[in-house]
Image: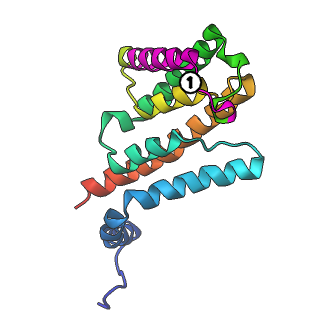
Amino acid sequence: MIPGISHGPPAAVEAERRHAAAPFARRVPPAVYSGLVIAAIGALGWASGVPWVFPSLGPSIAIQARSPEHRTARPWNVVVGHLIGAAVGFAVVRITGLVHQPPMNISHALTGARVVAAALAVFLSMALQELADANHAPAEATTLLIVVGALDATLKGALVLLAGIALIAVFGEAVRREKLERRASP
């Protein structure tokens, strides 16, 4: 036998290859996976001309890569949590009339209406996530991004959010499963 060269059937060769790669994959830091996922989403957005990268995706992929076994890393929590956060943010800016005011990053003004809207949005988002068993802390950032005007509370803004959420769910789930599989392997 020559070391490093398999002489068995294809299934045995594949198992041997995976076993040899396992120690390396277990050592890949979550930051590498997270950076690659955000780079992929960013590249897709750049190529399509749509800004699919927004701040609350960073904590989502960090949870999926760092704590894949945690309930908040599950696809249900990521998708439904962000959808609830976005829906609440859109509703609150419409109800409070903030949709007609300039975003905070342009006006540089924190008004009483924004403070009330932010508190209400976080409260409602967290309460609804709890009811749906879809707790996902980064979704509170999504709702706040909408309330402060950093994410557009328009149909186009909603579509951008949906795409970003879908991409982080798909890529993040691939990372989560990879990490779980590597932790379970000997």
Please report the residue visible at 39 percent of the width from the left and 56 percent of the height from the top.
30
* Residue at 44 percent of width and 43 percent of height: 59
Q: In the drawing, does residue 58 fall left or right of residue 110?
A: left
Mark 1 residue type: Ala
Q: Position of residue 55 (x, y in %)?
A: 54, 42
Question: x and y percent of residue 177 in the render?
Answer: 39, 48
Circle 1 SS class: helix
State which quarter of the image contains the C terminus: bottom left
Q: Is residue 146 above or below residue 181?
A: above
Front residue of this view, candidates 2 and 162: 162
**Quadrant of the rendered image containing residue 183:** bottom left
Quarter the N terminus occupies: bottom left
Which of 48/9 is in front?
48
Span shown in magenta: 106-129
Coloring scheme of the render? rainbow
Report the magenta stretch's main SS. Answer: helix
Left or right of residue 186: residue 153: right
**Residue with the most extreme right position:** 49
Q: Nearer the viewer, residue 186 or 12?
A: 186
Determine the residue positioned at 45% across, 61% down. 32
**Horizontal placement of 16 versus 186: left or right?**
right
- Looking at the rendered structure, the number of numbered marks drawn on it comes to 1
Residue placed under numbered mark 1 in the picture? 86
Q: Residue 115 colored magenta?
A: yes
